[in-house]
Amino acid sequence: MSTLLLASVATLVFCAPGYPGGAGDAQPFVEQFASAAAANAGWPAGSLAAVYDPTEQGGLAKLAGSDAVLAFVPYAFFFQHAAELHLTPLAQADVVGIGTQERWTLVAKAGAVKGPASLTGYTLLSVAGYAPDFVRRAALDAWPLPRDVKIEPTGQLLSALRRIAAGEHSVALLDQTQAAALPTLPFAAQLEAVRQSPPLPVAIVAVIAARLPAARARALQSGLLKMGHAAGDADTLGQLHLKGFVLPQIPAHTSAP
Amino acid sequence: MRWTGWALAALMVTGCRAPLRPAEPHPIPMTGTVQELAAAIDADAKRSDHEPDSKIRGELAAQASRDAAACLDRAPQSAACLYGRAIALGLEARAHPTRAGELLNTMLDSLGNAEAADPGYDEAGPARVRALVLIRAPGWPLGPGDTEAGLAAARRAATLRPQYPPNLLALAEALSKTGNSSGARENYERARALAQALPASEDRDGWIHEAGEALRRQ
């Protein structure tokens, strides 16, 4: 198996459900990233391909392909699918304007939510709504949601926040960028942050099901960690809003999702 | 993880412009009339739609911006020039994705000014293009996308020029994005029927194709 993989092109699958960007739009950027990562790792030119899929199902299908050896995914995706895909974290992204970790914020109509029990019958909307295990067990681990809370993905957070402010029985779980922008909304005074997650990784590069020989994985990890320090890589990283990578710091409670 | 290719989505609007005045060869000298300059911007946008080379798209965007500036010098309050500037800003956003957020916001301002000057220009183009930007651009907080505002703009365009197929295509897309699939289907079907009743042209074929594809996906 390893010999076969060494002789073939490995594929890095990027998947960021809920975030803007079509596959065609992002493809040149991820290809450039793969070339730079391979060069930093000392891999032969052309030995690492990359593909982007903006949907959870599309990403899962690509990750199931026999040529897929690496995943670059938001932490919510990693948490939701690490066990079934046998993902082993290799590096953690350092994202422009965010860093290596972020806190998620639960937002409700001002005064409407006193504790988790208040959310009985509510719907929780989030870009991470495709990953209910992440929502319940990572972002809101210490704030147990009632079992009947419906967790739904949305890419239309502005509409969701308007409905929440208007009194709809919904709450929104915002990532750090979204939460920071909350005060800019004209109806911000009608909303309140009711809970914040502990710091969680933003995005993870992981090996899929040990499909990469250990020596190659170590070389790639070393290459990724170097990327933020090589001037020539700044543009490549910047196109993906990245500054570089650090060693993975997976929170303890997520070690066996 | 905010992939930056999103800027392209907001720029797929040029196919929904009216077939402007008879196609002018390009380049049009910047000494032309308002109508000539508006036609030149439209020609740049159409070329850009089919141009795979990003460098050439960048040159077309720069040319369209120069033409828009020349147009506004001649007629600062003209709907044609304000609309042309908006289209040029869209081309610039496509050519420079890292500045797309700022450019698209300015594009929306320009479309608002064009709509105030003449809402019927280009078959209700200012409201139609505004709708398409709002429903295709990334939403808050990464971009100016706002599906509800997009739907309102699409309704304005469709009310003002209900017989123009691209207005119904934009309305159908906005309804689809806001979860009204039956309304979307109805308007795609109306758009297709209206287009089929028009004389043969490349634009007509494009509108029929767009409606048909959308109906197949539904």
Image (cartoon, rainbow, N blue to C red):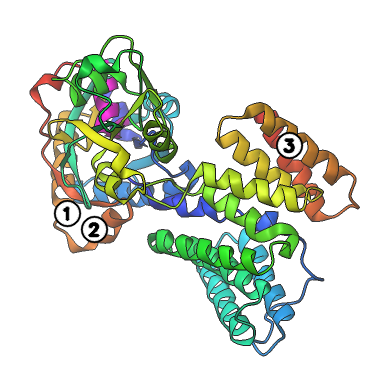
Q: Which mark is residue B135?
A: none
Q: Is residue B127 left or right of residue A46?
A: right
Q: Are marks 1 and 2 on the same chain?
A: yes
Q: Overall secondary structure of the magenta stretch? A: helix
Give the chain letter at badge 2. A
Mark 2 residue type: Asp
- Residue bearing the label numbered 1: A228
Residue sitting at x 34%, y 46%:
B2
Q: Is residue B197 above or below residue A160?
A: below
Relative depth, front residue between B206 and A214: B206
Mark 3 residue type: Asn
Relative depth, front residue between B66 and A89: B66
In the rendered image, is residue B218 in sight? no
Q: Which mark is residue A233?
A: 2
Give the chain letter at badge 3. B
Mark 1 residue type: Gly
Q: Are marks 1 and 2 in contact (CB under 8 Å)?
A: yes
In whole angstroms, how far apart are the C-alphas of marks 1 and 2? 7 Å
Q: Is residue A214 above or below residue A80?
A: below
- Residue bearing the label numbered 3: B187
> Looking at the rendering, in which quadrant would you find the N terminus of chain B?
top left
